[in-house]
Image (spheres, rainbow, N blue to C red):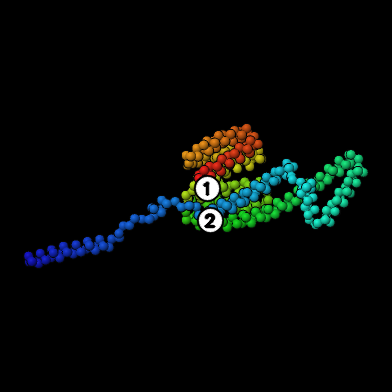
Amino acid sequence: MNKRSFLYKVITIFLIIATLGNLASCSPKLKPSPKATEESEEKDPPKELEELKKSIDKIEKALMSMHEEKKKAQQGIIPSQSSGGQGQQNQKGEGGQDKEGQQEKSNSQEQIQIQMNPEELAEYKNQQEKVKLQEELAKKEKETLEKFEDLKKDVLELHEKWNSYEPKAVTALAPQKSMEDFENALNNLTDTIQIKDEYINLLSVNLLYKILPDFYELYKTKEPPDLNRLRYGIKKIKLVAEKDDYNSMKPTLEYLINVWSVARPKLKKDSMSLMNKFEFALNDFKKSIEDKNKVIIDAKAEVLIKIIDEIVQSSKD
């Protein structure tokens, strides 16, 4: 009995040791998870997002150029092609024959003017200027329509760029609200581009700049995405000032000041002089809004945008 008891104990101990060994060998070995490392490594913005921004910039630049031309036309600052440009074009258009025809027309007009008394001559010149102005306006209107047709194509291309980036935004865990807001703003621009009004479309495309930084915040950037939010606020105030809409400026100014308070600590310390410069310009901008002086508002808006561009450049250096 003693031998069996001893043998049983030995076998039992052996089985326990063997069992523990098997358990140890079957246990999964703990390896350092790469997830934490991947999450800590920020990535650069994908090319799809950069292409999206370039498309928005292109549309805004075209609209702004058209808007400035329209303002000059409304103020009567239209470059007349009748005095120089148009005459030269006609001379070059169909060779000497057209030049001779123009000379004959000029001689005929001179003969008519000689036969007129001063009052009739003044009225005749006035009517001629009106005809030239109407022709110039008709030409400008035709050019504007053609530009809007091109802009419609650019907006469709913008939809394609957004659809290319959308899956990347989901992968980067972009906020659902930001994606919905961008989609709504893009759809709004698609609708307003049909109206063929530069001012309304500038307001629409500017809204995209307010939402775009939400996506850039998902990546590593050399400049704080808040700078584009600042651009949005400044441009909106500048636009609504044209319509004397000072009620719309107040919430946008508050937004602008809040964004600046968040953006400033994120900027490089060697940009301190530019930050101070922006701070003073922002205070002047605020005062011009309080004074309801849209000439100064426009001037200070340009100064602020220029300082932002300088801050961006300094962050790249």
Q: Secondary structure at mark 1?
A: helix
Distance of label 2 from label 1 (alpha carbons): 14 Å
Residue 180 screen position, x and y as percent: 54, 52
Disc 2 to disc 1: CB gap under 8 Å: no
Q: Amino acid at mark 1?
A: Pro
Residue beneath the point at 61% across and 34% down: 288
Sequence-first tag of 2 and 1? 2
Residues packed near mark 2 inside 10 Å, few (<14), some (14 to 19) or many (20 plus): some
Which label number is shown at residue 38?
none
In which quadrant of the rendered image does the N terminus lie?
bottom left
Which of the pair 229/86 is nearer the observer?
86
Counting labels gives: 2
Q: Amino acid at mark 2?
A: Glu
Q: Where is mark 1, residue-wise? A: 213
Residue beneath the point at 60% across and 57% down: 157
Residue 143 screen position, x and y as percent: 71, 52
Of discs 2 and 1, which sits in the foreground?
2
Residue beneath the point at 73% across and 44% down: 73
Q: Where is mark 2, residue-wise? A: 48
Residue 135 visible (yes or no): no
- In the displayed image of the protein, which residue is found farthest to the right? 115
Q: Secondary structure at mark 2?
A: helix
Residues packed near mark 1 inside 10 Å, few (<14), some (14 to 19) or many (20 plus): some
Residue 78 visible (yes or no): yes
Q: Is residue 287 above or below residue 142?
A: above
Residue beneath the point at 89% across and 41% down: 120
Residue 290 screen position, x and y as percent: 61, 33
Residue 187 screen position, x and y as percent: 60, 53
**In the image, is 280 to the left or to the right of 115?**
left
